[in-house]
Image (cartoon, grey):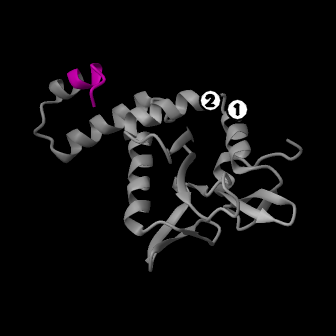
Amino acid sequence: MNHILPTNNEIAAILPIYTASGNSTQLLLTNGEEVFSPFKAATIIRRLAYRQTIDLLALKAKATQITQSTIWQPLVLAPDLVLVPLKTRNPKISGDATGGYINFPHIVSIKSIEKSTRLHLTGNHFVTSLWKLTTVQMHLRQAHLFLLNEAFTKDRTQLLQDKLLRMWLENPSNNFAELLRIYAMNRI
C-alpha cells in the first residue's frame, strides 16, 4: 500500500465510494478529516488486520460462532478498532461492495430517517446506512457481544477483576469468597 493507514483510534469509518477512477475507499477520521484511498474497502480491512497480526478468516469464523451470523459480521481488530458493518450504498455494478464499516467506539448517536439510519461519528462526520434503525441496532449489539467475548480486550485479568469488584460493590452482601472462587474459575 502506498500510503500509511491512520492509527486505530483515528479511524471513525471506512466507506466504499465511487470516484472518477472507480471503486475506492473513504476513511473518515476522528479529527474531522477525510482520507481517500484508491484501494477497495476490503483491502483496507485486510491491511488493518495484518497490522494487528490477526488472521481475518479466523476472526470471521469466531464472529460467526459468537453472533450466529455468517454475513455482515463485526470485526474486532483491537479494543479501539471494532468495525461494525453497515450497508452504505447501492452497487452500480454487480459485485461492487455495498458495505462500509463504522468504528464502534466513535459512534456519537444514531437516528432513524425514513427507511434509513443516520449515524453521527466522532469528528462531526455523518454516515447514512441504507438499513432501518432496528437493523443497525442489531449489528451494534452483535459488535458489542463480540467485543465482550473477545479474550484480547486489553487485559482480560483486569476486566475480570473490575467485574468482580463491581459485583461486590453493587451488592456487598455477596459472599466475597464465592465471588473469588468464580473469578478463579474465570466464569465472570
Q: Check disc 1 and report the residue beneath it.
A: 50
Q: How crowded is mark 1: few (under 14 residues within 10 Å), some or many (20 or more)?
A: few
Residue 109 visible in the snapshot: yes
Camera-side residue of 70 and 9: 70
Kindly indicate the quadrant of the structure image that contains residue 145. top left
Labels in figure, total: 2
Q: What residue is at 49 percent from the left and 35 percent from the top?
A: 153
Label 2: state its secondary structure. loop
Amino acid tagged 1:
Tyr
Camera-side residue of 96 and 117: 96
Q: Is residue 150 magenta?
A: no
Q: Is residue 187 magenta?
A: yes
In the drawing, what numbered circle is on residue 96? none
Amino acid tagged 2:
Ile
Q: Residue furthest bottom?
A: 114
Q: Residue furthest front?
A: 94
Q: What residue is at 44 percent from the left and 41 percent from the top?
A: 147
Q: Where is residue 10 in the image (x, y as percent from the top left)?
A: 68, 54
User: Is the C-beta separation of discs 1 and 2 under 8 Å?
Assistant: yes
Q: Is residue 87 left or right of residue 21?
A: left
Q: Position of residue 33 (x, y in %)?
A: 75, 66
Q: In this view, does 185 lie above or below 152?
A: above
Q: What residue is at 31 percent from the left and 38 percent from the top?
A: 163
Q: What segment carries the magenta color?
A: 181-188
Q: In this view, does 23 lie to the left or right of 2?
A: left
Q: Is residue 77 left or right of residue 19?
A: left
In the drawing, what numbered circle is on residue 54? 2
Residue 78 visible in the snapshot: no
Instruction: Name the quadrant of the C terminus.
Output: top left
Q: In this view, does 110 lie above or below 165?
A: below
Kindly indicate the quadrant of the structure image that contains residue 58. top right
Label 1: state its secondary structure. helix
